[in-house]
Image (spheres, helix red, strand yellow):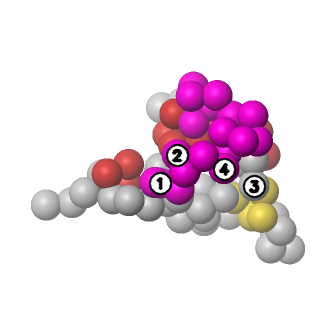
Amino acid sequence: MTREPIDSGRLDWIWNGELGEQGYTDLDLETTSRVLSRVCPTCAAGVGEWCRTPGGHVLDHLDLQHLTRRRFD
């Protein structure tokens, strides 16, 4: 049986309080979890990982994630 990414523990860090201290609301945390629960088709960032630029710089904010990853299905 395959576990859903949201249940795998790979996204637990989203709720550890650090993002809340940065001003993320509960809705932002839910959205971040949804976005980071899929692999990015642009940079191949894995589940639970922030996107990266071609030079390797981490895009460590929800608003910086690649649009292809943030789209609604």
Toward which corner of the image does residue 49 lie, by quadrant?
A: bottom right
| Mark 4 surroundings: few (<14), some (14-19) or many (≥20) residues within 10 A | few
Whole-number angstrom distance, CA of label 4 to CA of label 1: 13 Å
**Quick check: 36 above or below 50?**
above
Whole-number angstrom distance, CA of label 2 to CA of label 4: 8 Å
Whole-number angstrom distance, CA of label 1 to CA of label 3: 14 Å
Amino acid at the residue labelled 4: Glu
**Which label number is shown at residue 11?**
1
Which sits earlier in the primary sequence, circle 3 or circle 2? Answer: 2
Which sits earlier in the primary sequence, circle 4 or circle 3? Answer: 4
Q: Which residues are magenta?
A: 11-29
Amino acid at the residue labelled 3: Asp
Q: Residue at x 49, y 59 (%)?
A: 47
**Quick check: 19 above or below 26?**
below
Magenta stretch contains residue 18: yes
Toward which corner of the image does residue 3 lie, by quadrant?
A: bottom left
The x, y position of residue 1, in whole percent, is 13, 61
Q: Residue at x 53, y 56 (%)?
A: 13
**Which label number is shown at residue 60?**
3
**Quick check: 18 above or below 54?**
above
| Mark 1 surroundings: few (<14), some (14-19) or many (≥20) residues within 10 A | some
Left of 43 or right of it: where is 5? Answer: left
Amino acid at the residue labelled 2: Trp
Left of 60 or right of it: where is 36? Answer: left
The residue that mark 4 highlights is: 18
The x, y position of residue 65, in whole percent, is 72, 47
Say whether residue 31 is visible. Answer: no
Q: Residue at x 60, y 46 (%)?
A: 17
Q: Residue at x 68, y 63 (%)?
A: 43
Amino acid at the residue labelled 1: Leu
The residue that mark 2 highlights is: 15
The residue lying toward the viewer, choosing from 4 and 10, is: 10
